[in-house]
Image (cartoon, rainbow, N blue to C red):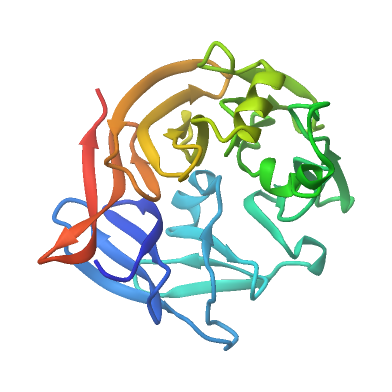
Amino acid sequence: MEEYPVEMDIYDDVLYVVMAKADTCIHLFNKRTGKLLKRIGTVGNGPEDVLSPEFVRNNYENKAILKGIEMYDMNTRNKFVAYSDSLGSFTKLPEDYLGWGSLNLNQKYLVGKHIGEKNSLFQICDLRTSQITKVPVYPELSSTLTDKVKDNLWLMYSANVLCNLNLHKIFVSMYYFDMIQVYNLQGKLQNVICLDKDGDNNEEQFRKLLNRKNYVGYIQCYATSGYAYFRRSLKNGETDDVMNNQIVQVDWNGMVTHVWEVGQEMTSGFCIDQDRYLYCIKKGELQNEEAFFILRYALS
């Protein structure tokens, strides 16, 4: 693959991969053979074109009903479904949610993170009343932060949001902190999951960032009906290169149930099939040129 894959999801026997450098940017592969089945999603400005499509985070709740994968594109403000042969079921998202990412939604709620919001970690919208709850940032601000750093808090508090809206659970994993936060649908913090001994030491977490020390963060995530999965990466504080990866499995009660070592094999998005198989993207070389590969691992 040369089109720079960035995200992936799975429905039935098909892997859906979003390509960042392709004129038709959603590629469908057979999950067993790796054979390219179809390209869908024309990049453009037409009413059913896409610019930067992303997967709805909690689409595991609707795949069987929709017979496809729910996606959105904030640049076009469209929500739509990726079927096995085309994109369809286009609807417009309200302008109030322009700039939101990491979207989770159902008929009652929309939960995500407004990119660039400095004073809120993520947002919860009750679609029945249109009321938006802005959840305060966590961990709390360190007294050692300079004004310059405070002006860039939107970057420091980069996060992914995963929901099980039926169970009223929201998991927030941090790019630059070794923690996963558990909230309810009212935005109340219920638990903080830390695998490192300093994970809940806010001052230590901030010190590592400010001093450009190696740090652990959660770059990507994925959800199934049974579990939330997080890519936990050890990163070089100077170069931002990933030095090691783990996949952390957390049940929807907030309990860590398994941690798998993946090493440096993962370089981009991943998905989980039936809580049994990990599919991930690896960057490498093929015939002395940059190439990307889809890898499959059995989770045992």
241 is higher (above) or lower (below) than 298: below
Q: Is residue 92 visible?
A: yes
- Counting the numbered discs, the total is 0
Could you tell me residue 291's position as x and y percent? 23, 63
- Residue depicted at 72% across the width and 62% down the height: 99
Q: In the shown orientation, is residue 140 left or right of residue 248?
A: right
Residue 275 percent coordinates (x, y): 35, 32
Residue at x 56%, y 26% (from the top left corner): 178
Q: Please name whichever residue, 275 or 265, is drawn nearer the observer in this view of the structure.
A: 265
Q: Can the viewer see residue 108 in this picture?
A: no
Where on the picture, by quarter, is residue 229? top left
| 101 displayed left or right of 27 | right
Q: Position of residue 142 (x, y in %)?
A: 79, 27
Q: Position of residue 131 (x, y in %)?
A: 89, 49
Q: Residue sitting at 33 percent across and 36 percent down?
A: 274
Q: Is residue 281 left or right of residue 141?
A: left
Q: Residue furthest bottom?
A: 46
Determine whether 280 is above or below 28 in the image: above
Q: Quick check: 102 above or below 285?
A: above
Closer-to-camera residue (216/44): 216
User: In the image as oriented, which residue stretches furthest toward the left?
Assistant: 287
Q: Nearer the viewer, residue 2 or 239?
A: 239
Residue furthest top as drawn:
197
